[in-house]
Amino acid sequence: MKKLFTFLFCISFSLFAAAQSSVTKVSKKTNNALSNSSVSETNATVAPTENLSLKETEYDFGKIPQGKPVTHNFQFTNSGNIPLALDNVRASCGCTTPEWSRDTVGVGASAIIKVGYNAANEGPFTKLVTVIYNGNQSKQIIIKGEVWKTPVTSAPVNTSLNDLKNEQ
């Protein structure tokens, strides 16, 4: 009796597994056919054009003193055939602050993205700024450099000066 139940269980399990794999194959073929037709229709109707042309995508500040914020203006041009809108400009950390105009940039017009860096920490840095425009397109710009540690006081302490003050 155990052998009969085991045999029936194995047969039903095999049939169940075979049925599942054929359904999966059919659904994958159907999904692929649907997605391929959707992709070809999408590509035919919506062909995003590259309309944000940056004059430069990277700027090196070189060596900068600690505690002195620095800025750089990245110039860009709308090289497309529709107006360009900067939706967002995001920095990779809080020490980098981008500023930009919320106005649309006409065809052939130029504008700037001002990127500031707070040089509070000593050492080399590389920061990414992501520019999101026209809904879903994006580009990255990079700032980099090295912050050198500035002295705590403006000049070394002159002990002779204290001696002169004490003599008077």
Image (cartoon, helix red, strand yellow):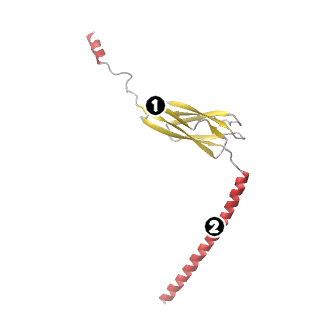
Q: Which residue is mark 1?
A: 63
Image spot of residue 15 (x, y percent): 58, 79
Residue sitting at x 63%, y 45%: 137
How many circles with numbers are drawn on the protein? 2
Which numbered marker is on residue 3?
A: none
Residue located at (51% from left, 34% from top)? 60
What residue does disc 2 label?
Answer: 28
- Judge from the rendering whether residue 50 lies leftward or rightward of residue 117; answer left or right: right
Percent position of residue 136, x then y = 64, 47
Report if the CB atoms under discs 1 and 2 are less than 8 Å apart: no
Q: Amino acid at mark 1?
A: Lys
Q: Position of residue 95 (x, y in %)?
A: 49, 36
Provide the secondary structure element on which disc 2 rests.
helix
Q: Amino acid at mark 2?
A: Lys
Mark 1 against mark 2, which lies toward the viewer? 1
Q: Residues within 10 Å of mark 1 (few under 14, many from 20)?
A: few
Q: Secondary structure at mark 1?
A: strand
Q: CA distance from mark 1 to mark 2?
A: 57 Å
